[in-house]
Image (cartoon, rainbow, N blue to C red):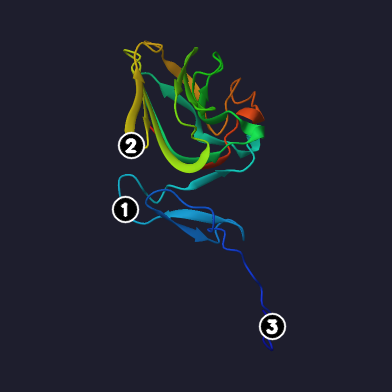
């Protein structure tokens, strides 16, 4: 495009193109930087509030992780976590961790991560692998994970349906001082991060109860 007399043309890329937002949101450019954008809610509803945002993890390294502001959480009865995610397979991050909770006394107190056609959840020192379609396919998916202390009952929800469940997963376990991280698996308390286990993609609408 030629410059008009007295004017200089500057082209800006629309960073919403190719960066679709989650359900119930619309993409808006110009937030954070010239290359920034945000996913804004289209309506007021229980599953979409103004506080939701899209967290981008481009590298799978520990520099991309997000931590819970209060840092320390307690789980003495039950635990539920849910989020929209969009990721893809990458040689540098073949095991992709969505969230992890660790303590100063126990490695991997809670975590959920994606593998090649598997989902692994861990509570205390017990890990469970369940078979699934490979969710690292560049499409949006929604997950939910629940665990109850009294009986060790657990469930995994995928894309709105209860997909896996079990019982007697570390019943009676109480987590009194946990560090909550999105996008990384902690091998030590807020540390021991492995780039090959880091999340690569977008997380949206993360909720924890």
Residue 78 is drawn in which quadrant? top left
Estimate the x, y position of residue 118 in percent, counting from the top left. Answer: 49, 25
Residue 57: image tag: none
Q: Is residue 110 left or right of residue 4?
A: left
What secondary structure is marked by label 2? loop
Compute the Cα span from label 1 to label 2. Answer: 20 Å
Question: Which residue is most to the bottom?
Answer: 5
Q: Quadrant of the N terminus?
A: bottom right
Report if the CB atoms under discs 3 and 1 are less than 8 Å apart: no
Measured along the vertical axis of the image, is residue 126 above or below residue 196? above
- For marks 3 and 2, the one nearer the N-term is 3
Residue designated by label 1: 44
Residue at 33% from the left image edge and 36% from the top image edge? 160
Compute the Cα span from label 3 to label 1. Answer: 43 Å
- For marks 1 and 2, the one nearer the N-term is 1
Disc 3 crowd rating (10 Å Cα; few below 14, some 14-19, many 20+) is few
Residue at 43% from the left image edge and 47% from the top image edge? 52
Estimate the x, y position of residue 128 in percent, counting from the top left. Answer: 46, 17
Residue designated by label 2: 160
Q: Is residue 45 visible?
A: yes
């Amino acid at each position: 495009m030629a410059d008009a007399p007295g004017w200089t043309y500057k082209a800006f890329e629309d960073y919403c193109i190719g960066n679709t937002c989650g359900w119930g949101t619309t993409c808006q450019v110009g937030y954070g930087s010239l290359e920034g954008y945000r996913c804004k809610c289209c309506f007021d509803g229980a599953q979409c509030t103004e506080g939701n945002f899209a967290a981008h993890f481009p590298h799978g390294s520990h520099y991309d992780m997000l931590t819970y502001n209060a840092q320390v959480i307690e789980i003495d009865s039950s635990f539920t976590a849910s989020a929209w995610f969009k990721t893809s397979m990458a040689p540098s991050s073949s095991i992709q961790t969505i969230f992890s909770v660790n303590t100063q006394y126990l490695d991997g107190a809670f975590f959920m991560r994606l593998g090649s056609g598997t989902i692994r959840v861990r509570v205390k020192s017990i890990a469970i692998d369940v078979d699934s379609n490979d969710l690292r396919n560049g499409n949006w998916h929604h997950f939910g994970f629940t665990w109850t202390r009294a009986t060790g009952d657990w469930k995994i929800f995928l894309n709105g349906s209860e997909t896996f469940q079990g019982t007697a997963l570390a019943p009676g376990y109480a987590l009194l001082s946990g560090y909550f991280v999105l996008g990384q698996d902690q091998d030590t308390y807020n540390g021991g991060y492995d780039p090959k286990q880091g999340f690569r993609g977008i997380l949206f609408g993360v909720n924890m109860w």
